[in-house]
Amino acid sequence: MRIGVDLGGTKTEAVALGRAGAELARLRIDTPSGGYDSLVRGIAELVAAVESQAGESRAGGRAPAIGIGTPGSLSPATGLMRNSNTVVLNGRALDRDLAAALGRPVRLQNDANCFALAETMAGAARGLDTVFGVILGTGVGGGIVSGGRVLAGHNLIAGEWGHNPLPAAAPGEFPGPPCYCGRNGCIETWCSGPAMTADHANATGEALDPPRIAARAAAGDAAAQATLERHLDRLARALAGVVNLLDPNAIVLGGGLSNLDHLRDRLAEAMRPHVFSDVFTTPILNNRLGDSAGVIGAAWLWPEGNP
């Protein structure tokens, strides 16, 4: 049995999977709000509960190790959490504290890496060797999976394409909007959901979220259509850079913007002129696991359920 935990800002979920990936049990709780120690205790109790529920099946038992998906990542310099929007985690040795509370090894990856792993092992890119998973939502993130394992990188930042500059920036795109990371013109400031809203507002004076912009475009609104075209062009340039560097077997789209038809239908063709190749046949896939990807990916962090 393998167990994964998806630690979110408001909800935390745990799942127990059998050896072949069949779901044995799943539980969700409100993320504990009483501070860091309360959060660690809450995760330990959640793991115990899902393990107990899975134990009612013939395939149950005690998982030898636990996978954790979380916003943010561990610093290779300090071993402490950084860049998490669950701010009580920052500066804490979350993996070591959870291992002590659970009494067994813990492997921790950020939520984008877990998304990519889930879609590779059990979702849209199942069976493919190298996969780039894209998160397009309130931010822009990504994860790389190769040979069934997360590629975390030497500095534990592999896949963080959202904080590269937008490629081939036009005069009106330079230096670009300010990013929370301290720089200007990051891909995230052009391709995220809030970025689309801001771009549309700059062009029209009207603040609309991406689904409303898409609905207006479908109804024939020229300004909304132009906003979607600008977003498509910028995202195509950004992802073509990933293809030129990594050349994955597939790209899987996740996050709220992955539901927009103009990305599913036209993104590959928009990327083609920017890819350094005479052919471009990389599949651009929509995710299959939806909100379940994070917790399923966390469960797959330990191959075969063992350290």
Image: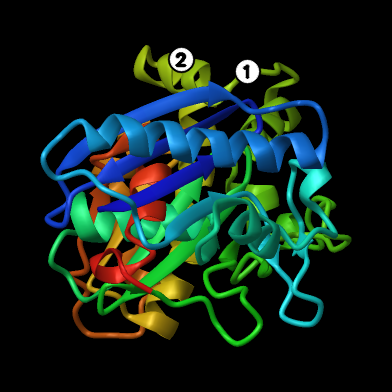
User: Which residue is at 67% across, 38% downward?
Assistant: 41
Image position of 225 (left or right of 289): right
- Judging by the rendered image, the residue that carries numbered circle 1 is 208
Q: How is the image coloured?
A: rainbow
- Circles 1 and 2 in contact, beta carbons < 8 Å: yes
Of the pair 244 and 87, the residue shown nearer to us: 87
> Residue 166 location in percent, x, y?
63, 65
Q: Which amino acid does label 1 sit on?
A: Leu
Q: SS class of the residue under badge 2?
A: helix
Image position of 66 (left or right of 171): left
From what the image shows, is residue 215 above or below residue 171?
above
Q: How crowded is mark 2: few (under 14 residues within 10 Å), some or many (20 or more)?
A: some
> Residue 192 location in percent, x, y?
59, 43
From what the image shows, is residue 132 above or below residue 155?
above
Q: Quadrant of residue 205?
A: top right
For the C terminus, the quadrant is bottom left
Q: Residues within 10 Å of mark 1 (few under 14, many from 20)?
A: some
Q: Which amino acid does label 2 sit on?
A: Arg
- Residue 199 visible: yes
Of the pair 170 and 86, the residue shown nearer to us: 86
User: Which residue is at 49% across, 42% downward?
Assistant: 6
> Residue 88 location in percent, x, y?
82, 43
- Residue 292 visible: no
> Residue 66 location in percent, x, y?
44, 57
Of the pair 131 and 28, the residue shown nearer to us: 28
User: Which residue is at 37% across, 12% downward?
Assistant: 219
Query: Which residue is outermost to the right?
Result: 182
Q: Which is more N-terminal, label 2 or label 1?
A: 1
- Judging by the rendered image, the residue that carries numbered circle 2 is 216
Q: Quadrant of residue 147?
A: bottom left
Q: In which quarter of the image is residue 197?
A: top right
